[in-house]
């Protein structure tokens, strides 16, 4: 069995599972945020009104965690009330792991999941957000669910899954300095399409995957969502364990796939052949080499989100921006308060501000086109985020190009889409 199949088999008490099998799995961790949480609360309210099914307690408050990330700082009265309702909910049901904006550590849900060691190898983790796939990089089965399914998990501690087929992506070679994980995953999505992994597991392996730091691995699994995958996953290794030792002393039981596991498809990439890659509007699969787009004028550069504002991302962007000035509006938003503090200690924030960039608080606001830097009509942005659909980051007639942190930083310096090698040289 693959690692995905083995995790689901263990969670369902089965000796063996195959793709297509339907089973009920015991869930280890559940996540809600300030958008999905109010939606789940509404489901419970409807169940009580229509079915007389009142939620008196949730299955295990210690396995549930909540963060405020999408509409913080509160953008309007409704978003402020959502925060209040979420706080009342966590208090009522004894959920103590609530990362509140303005009270110390908080941040983007798909960053806190690993930054705080909330999810561990071998676990089944579900969250009320489509990019929950991110945390599969630590060797867990991580998948996003809708409001009703999350409500069911909160009541029962389990949920059904159809076991996905697994696609294996082997990435080999020696990684050049101008290539980041974002280039790898954009290339893959460009090759297989945004529906190429529908309800499948995307597993990453190969010599490069082993050498990648944890935060780069998380970029790979994060964007499996953009290929339609049920989950993205990387087998845990010493890099995983070292990363977790710095964040938690919790015990866990990692899982590894069998040597003779069957994969529905196997893809192999030689990383030396990859180019800094950009996804053009209006799809993550609409890719080109950065140098093919070098005349594209920009209005804004955005370094943020669960995909592009981890500490490694900020370090990479700062290396480009050091002793340089940006030519376009540039925003840098670390993905969590703890990352912000580390970046401050390392001098990265100073580099960004001396370059002319604005540094803001952790939030999903601009990424989802809600607030804190949305795009106006006809504006063009290059961004470290994961989606560039029409209107994703603001006005439906704006345009977003997706790229790695170093491509975005290099483009901020020139004011047009730029290969980082051309700035370094």
Image (cartoon, rainbow, N blue to C red):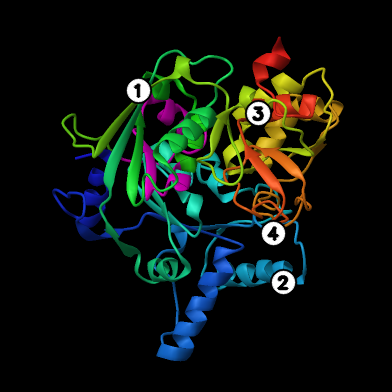
Percent coordinates x, y for residue 401 in the rendering: 64, 39
Q: CA distance from mark 3 to mark 4?
A: 33 Å
Query: Who comes first in sequence, dot 2 or dot 4?
Result: 4
- Distance (Cα) linking label 3 and label 2: 40 Å
Q: Which residue is mark 3?
A: 293
Q: Which residues are magenta?
A: 224-253
Mark 2–mark 4 distance (CA, rounded to whole Å):
10 Å
x, y percent for residue 125 = 40, 52
* Mark pair 1, 2: CA separation: 47 Å
**Which residue carries the number 2 mark?**
78
| Marks 3, 2: nearer the viewer | 3
Q: Earlier in the sequence, mark 3 or mark 2?
A: 2
- Residue occupying the far left of the picture: 15
**Residue 417 in the image, given as x and y percentages of width and height:** 70, 29
- Which of the numbered marks, if any, corresponds to residue 206? 1
Indicate the position of residue 306 as horizontal and vertical percent values: 58, 43
> Which residue position holds label 4?
71
The mark nearer the N terminus, 1 or 2, is 2
Per the image, is 245 magenta? yes
Tell me the element at label 3.
helix
Element on which disc 1 rests = loop
Relative to 79, say whether 99 is above or below.
Answer: above
Label 1 crowd bin: few (<14), some (14–19), many (20+), radius 10 Å? some
Secondary structure category for the residue under label 4? loop
Mark 4 touching mark 1, by CB under 8 A? Answer: no
Q: Residue at x 60, y 28 (%)?
A: 312
Q: Is residue 137 above or below residue 82?
A: above
Distance of mark 4 from mark 1, alpha carbons?
38 Å
Q: Is residue 336 magenta?
A: no
């Amino acid at each position: 069995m693959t690692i995905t199949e083995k995790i689901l088999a263990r969670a369902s008490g089965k000796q063996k599972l195959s793709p297509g099998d339907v089973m009920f799995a015991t869930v280890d961790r559940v996540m809600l945020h300030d958008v999905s949480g109010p939606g789940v609360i509404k489901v419970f309210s409807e169940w009580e009104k229509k079915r007389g099914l009142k939620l008196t307690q949730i299955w295990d408050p210690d396995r549930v965690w909540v963060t405020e990330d999408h509409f913080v700082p509160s953008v309007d009265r409704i978003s402020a009330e959502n925060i209040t309702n979420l706080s009342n909910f966590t208090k009522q049901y004894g959920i103590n792991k609530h990362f509140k904006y303005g009270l110390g550590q908080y941040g983007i849900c798909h960053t806190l999941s690993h930054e705080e060691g909330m999810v561990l190898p071998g676990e089944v983790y579900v969250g009320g957000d489509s990019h929950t796939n991110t945390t599969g990089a630590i060797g867990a089965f991580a998948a996003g669910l809708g409001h009703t399914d999350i409500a069911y998990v909160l009541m029962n501690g389990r949920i059904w899954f159809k076991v996905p087929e697994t696609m294996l992506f082997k990435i080999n070679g020696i990684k050049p300095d101008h290539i980041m994980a974002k280039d790898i995953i954009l290339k893959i999505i460009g090759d297989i399409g945004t529906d190429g992994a529908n309800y499948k597991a995307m597993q990453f392996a190969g010599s490069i995957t082993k050498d990648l730091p944890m935060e780069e691995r998380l970029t790979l699994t994060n964007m499996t969502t953009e290929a339609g995958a049920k989950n993205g996953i990387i087998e845990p290794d010493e890099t995983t364990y070292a990363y977790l030792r710095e964040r938690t002393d919790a015990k866990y039981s990692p899982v590894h796939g069998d040597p003779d596991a069957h994969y529905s498809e196997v893809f192999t990439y030689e990383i030396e052949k990859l180019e800094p890659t950009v996804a053009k509007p209006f799809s993550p699969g609409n890719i080109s080499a950065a140098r093919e787009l070098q005349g594209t004028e920009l209005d804004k550069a955005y370094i943020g989100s669960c995909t592009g504002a981890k500490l490694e991302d900020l370090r990479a962007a700062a290396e480009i921006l050091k002793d340089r000035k940006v030519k376009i509006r540039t925003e840098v938003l670390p993905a969590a308060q703890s990352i912000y503090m580390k970046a401050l200690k390392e001098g990265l924030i100073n580099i960004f501000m001396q370059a002319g960039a604005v540094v803001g608080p952790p939030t999903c606001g601009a990424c989802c086109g809600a607030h804190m830097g949305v795009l106006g009509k006809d504006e063009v942005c290059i961004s470290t985020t994961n989606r560039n659909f029409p209107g994703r980051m603001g006005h439906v007639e704006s345009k977003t190009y997706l790229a790695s942190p170093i491509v975005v930083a290099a483009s901020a310096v020139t004011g047009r889409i730029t290969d980082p090698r051309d700035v370094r040289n």
